[in-house]
Image (spheres, grey):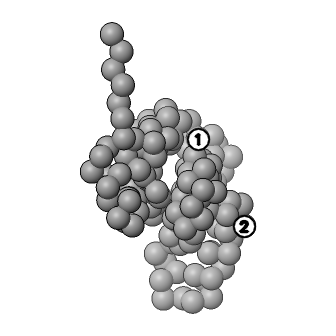
């Protein structure tokens, strides 16, 4: 006996009415397991939000990052550089999964990433970080 899961009708109606459903979390295991793709197909997901607090929950709440953190620490990277590597990797992976939505719709299919909070009162530093992330991410469907 097989069970077929279809599209969430309520979320499909919401999407049809012009509202884009975004997920306010990101985690490597969710991307690599196919869960993010499932959310796009079944729950009409149109984007993903990420920020330092979301990454903190993902890192502390799973073992997804243990290997990468160890490897980066052994290379001598500090905590901020390790965070940046994790964030860039996950946002790239998420953007790759959402690329089909972006290609189809143009106005959706994005993954967001925030600059660090220390730059909040420094316009030039904010711009430097945003440009650095944009260059490192190398995906058209991300926004900083």
Which residue is at a point 52% across and 80% down the rendered structure image? 119
Residue 17: name its quadrant. Answer: bottom left
Looking at the image, can residue 137 be seen? no
Q: Which mark is residue 33?
A: none
Q: Residues within 10 Å of mark 1 (few under 14, many from 20)?
A: few
Residue that lies at the very extreme toward the top in this rendered image: 1
Q: Is residue 69 left or right of residue 35?
A: right
- For label 1, the SS is helix
Image: 93 above or below 1: below
Residue 84: name its quadrant. Answer: bottom right
Location of residue 91 in the rendering, given as x and y in whole percent from the top left corner: 57, 55
Q: Earlier in the sequence, mark 2 or mark 1?
A: 1
Quarter the C terminus occupies: bottom right
Which residue is at a point 30% across and 46% down the rendered structure image? 9
Quarter the N terminus occupies: top left
Q: Nearer the viewer, mark 2 or mark 1?
A: 2
Q: Is residue 9 left or right of residue 80?
A: left
Q: Which mark is residue 68?
A: 1
Q: Which mark is residue 135?
A: 2
Looking at the image, can residue 100 be seen? yes
Closer to the camera in the image, 76 or 111: 111
Q: Residues within 10 Å of mark 2 (few under 14, many from 20)?
A: few
Location of residue 56 in the rendering, given as x and y in whole percent from the top left corner: 40, 54
Task: Give the number of marks.
Answer: 2
Give the spatial CA distance, label 2 vs label 1: 21 Å
Closer to the camera in the image, 76 or 24: 24
Location of residue 21 in the rendering, given as x and y in whole percent from the top left corner: 38, 59
- For label 2, the SS is helix
Closer to the camera in the image, 89 or 44: 44
Residue 87: name its quadrant. Answer: bottom right
Q: Is residue 139 left or right of residue 10?
A: right
Location of residue 20 in the rendering, given as x and y in whole percent from the top left corner: 40, 63
């Amino acid at each position: 006996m097989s069970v077929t899961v279809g599209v969430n009708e309520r979320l499909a109606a919401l999407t049809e009415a012009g509202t884009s459903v975004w997920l306010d979390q990101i985690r490597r295991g969710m991307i690599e397991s196919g869960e993010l793709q499932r959310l796009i197909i079944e729950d009409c997901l149109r984007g993903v939000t990420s920020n330092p607090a979301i990454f903190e929950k993902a890192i502390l709440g799973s073992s997804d990052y243990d290997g990468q953190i160890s490897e980066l620490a052994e290379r001598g990277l500090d905590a901020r550089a390790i965070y940046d590597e994790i964030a860039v990797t996950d946002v790239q992976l998420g953007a790759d999964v959402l690329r089909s939505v972006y290609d189809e719709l143009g106005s959706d299919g994005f993954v967001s990433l925030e600059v660090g909070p220390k730059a909040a009162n420094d316009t030039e530093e904010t711009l430097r970080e945003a440009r650095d992330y944009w260059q490192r991410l190398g995906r058209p469907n991300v926004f900083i």
